[in-house]
Image (cartoon, helix red, strand yellow):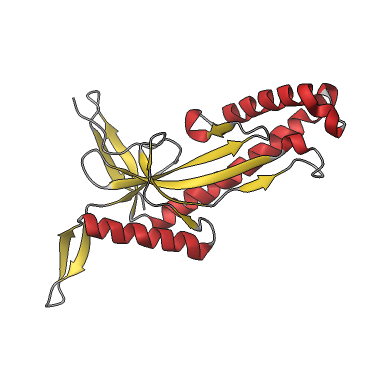
Amino acid sequence: MGTCNFYTINAQSYHTINDTYIDYDENGNEVERQRDTWDYDDYIDCIRYNGEESGLFPYPSNGEYNNRMKAMDICSNGGELHTFGNGNAWTTETYIESTICLRSGYYSGAIFDYDIRVQTYEGVDLYLSDYDNEDDLVDDYLDILYDLIEWQGHNHKWNVGTFKMHKENIRKWLTKLITAEIEKCEKFCKDNAEDELAVYARFSNGETWYTKVG
């Protein structure tokens, strides 16, 4: 049985780093060299530098292994707190953090991926990687918010009826925030990769061929 070299959990494209790179010999001729561990470490340091300089992902990780993503964390945006509407509905306080990671290929190279953590007011973490899409995550968020408002929404003059009236607007609000995070992650992965690949052929035994995009 064959195994595909790359897979993604959240990333919508195959943004990769190769095991080889083009260098120059003493005569100025192009030569292909094998990228070793030190070369990969330098590349990852450059990614972290780019995250900091761009302000998009200014918080570098220490190379922790992310079991949920089966990849190494590279950098994150540190997260940001959001509140629906005029900011008085404190039960809608939501912390959203995005993390860029790098996963080794099964045979060679590595591929960028990312995860987005949505934390509810009561501290429940929802990860995009646990869902098929952001809509399913938002559905779970709304269920949690419903229970919270039913329990103590009266503390800011909300009740279940008020929640139902605002539910679709809250859905749009949170979906917009998550979509914006996805777009930033996708762009950062693309800008820091060597190649963008697409699946050229996938066989019944699991073997997969890739081709460069563009």
Q: Residue 37, located in which quarter of the rendered image?
A: bottom left
In the image, 34: left or right of 165?
Answer: left
Residue 158: in sight, yes or no? Answer: no
Query: Quick one: 31 or 62, which is closer to the camera?
Result: 62
In the image, 11: left or right of 18?
Answer: right
101 shown above or below 153: below
Residue 100: in sight, yes or no? Answer: yes
Q: Residue at the right extreme? A: 157
| Residue at the image point whose x is 64% and y is 37% from the top | 175
| Percent of width and height locating residue 153 | 81, 28
| Percent of width and height locating residue 26 | 12, 77
Q: How many marks?
A: 0
User: Considering the image in quadrants, where does the N terminus appear?
Assistant: top left
Q: Residue at the bottom extreme? A: 27
185 shown above or below 147: below
| Residue at the image point whose x is 56% and y is 45% from the top | 97
| Percent of width and height locating residue 147 | 72, 22
Q: Residue 8, located in which quarter of the rendered image?
A: top left
In the image, 11: left or right of 3?
Answer: right
Query: Quick one: 55 or 109, which is closer to the camera?
Result: 55
| Residue at the image point whose x is 37% and y is 62% from the top | 46
Q: Residue 168, located in which quarter of the rendered image?
A: top right
In the image, 151: left or right of 19?
Answer: right
